[in-house]
Amino acid sequence: MQTIIVKIGVDISGLRPPMITAAWIVLNIFMEIDKECVITGGGENAPGRSKMSRHWVGLALDFRTRHLSDSDIKALSRMLVARLGHAYSWKITKSGSNKHLHLQYNGKGL
Ligand SMILES: [Zn+2]
């Protein structure tokens, strides 16, 4: 069984329930495209992270995408749209040394 790998130095201790649910959904997508699921960003201090970032409050995660092909990225995007719903937003950075999926919860009522 595949699992989520958390990169060394990444802090997931403050994750809030909507992001735990989202991480489970993302893991399932990575399993379906047969690629490793690695969390590369959580609530830890990271260079360039804005003061307003949802990472600080347990409502955002980053996932590794550098090992994904273009067709994997397309499949990932399609499945995120289908499965996550409107309370989440995400951005896939495809170029440079900072390739990753940033995923956050925007919903209210926490
Ligand atoms: Zn992020």
Image (cartoon, grey):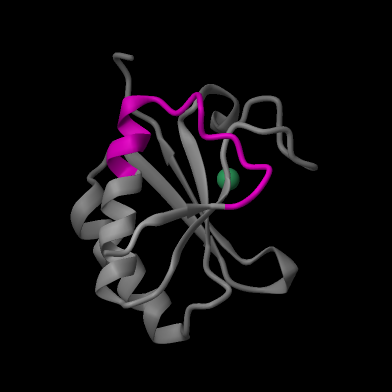
- Nearer the observer, 74 or 22: 22
Q: Horizontal placement of 56 versus 76: left or right?
A: right
53 left or right of 27 in image? right
Above/below status of 71 relative to 84 = below
Q: How many marks?
A: 0
Asked if 2 appears above or below 6 in the picture, the reply is below
Image position of 98 (left or right of 41): right
- How far across and down, in percent of the image, does residue 18 sit? 31, 31
Q: In this picture, is 3 found above or below 107?
A: below
The percent position of residue 61, horizontal first and vertical second, equals 50, 43
Q: Quadrant of ligand 1?
A: top right
Residue occupying image coordinates x 62% and y 66%:
99
- Residue 33 location (% of width, % of height): 30, 77
Query: Hey, which residue is sitting farthest top in the picture?
Result: 109
Is 66 situated above or below 4? below
Please name the predominant secondary structure of the magenta segment in the image: loop
- Residues 2 and 38: in front is 2
**Image quadrant where one finds the C terminus:** top left
Which quarter shows the N terminus?
bottom left
Residue drawn 34% across and 36% down? 20
Residue 12 counted in the magenta span: yes
Question: Residue 44 placed where, x, y %?
Answer: 66, 33
Q: Residue at x 44, y 51 (%)?
A: 90
Choose between 3 and 22: the one closer to the eye. Answer: 3
Q: Residue at x 68, y 43 (%)?
A: 9
Which stretch did the figure color magenta? 7-22
Of all residues, the one furthest to the front in this rendering is 1
Q: Quadrant of residue 79?
A: bottom left
